[in-house]
Amino acid sequence: MGNEGGDAIRDFQDLEVWQMAMDLSDRIYRLTWEFPRHEVYGLASQLQRASVSIPSNFAKGRMRGTRRDYAHFVSMARGSLTEKRKQLILAQRLDYTTTEQSDALLNSSEHLARRLNALRRSLQSRLEPEQPITPVRSKPKTQNLKPKEGFSR
């Protein structure tokens, strides 16, 4: 995994996982250019947005100030990757892609997913454990069970 979870690399563009995500986005764009014209604002657009969201979220997270933020944005990148995978399957079912095209992109997606999962686990393992939030409870008010003066039964 290299230094992708560490601080030694200064720019997100140097990170292999970002480069993988960008390559995948490039391949998705090239694929969707071949989709039917009526899908320009439909599935093609959704695939493009989801694929761009992966490296974008990764880059945003990498440039944040904390590992917790980084892990959060890596999770968002994983979500976009899952969305893109679902859309690729639909594109294949609609015969917008060949089995070979879809399989190649799904395999690349799976490899990227494993890398993002490993990165997120690495980041989370280096976070300080969160303290559980316990509600502040005040002592229950005790009632004075002694009868008031002058009270008779």
Image (cartoon, rainbow, N blue to C red):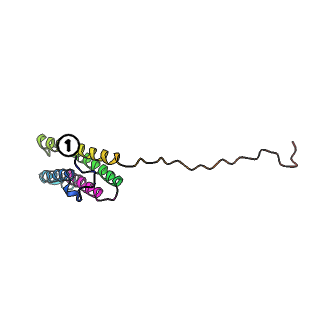
Mark 1 = which residue?
111
Q: Residue 134 location in percent, x, y? A: 52, 47
Is 76 placed left or right of 104 in the picture?
right
Under circle 1, the secondary element is helix
Q: Residue 20 location in percent, x, y? A: 18, 50
Q: Quadrant of the C terminus?
A: top right
Is 142 placed left or right of 85 in the picture?
right
In the image, 153 versus 132, the foreground residue is 132
In the image, 84 versus 76, the foreground residue is 76
Write the residue at 34% across / 45% down: 125
Is 151 placed left or right of 78 in the picture?
right
Is 58 placed left or right of 69 in the picture?
left
Q: Residue 114 location in percent, x, y? A: 24, 42
Q: Amino acid at mark 1?
A: His
Tell me the magenta residue range: 43-65
Q: Check if residue 47 falls in the magenta segment.
A: yes
Write the residue at 23% across / 48% down: 84
Q: Check if residue 44 falls in the magenta segment.
A: yes
Q: Main secondary structure of the magenta part?
A: helix
Q: Residue furthest front?
A: 8
Q: For mark 1, does the 10 Å Cα neighbourhood hold few (<14), some (14 to 19), or many (20 or more) residues?
A: some
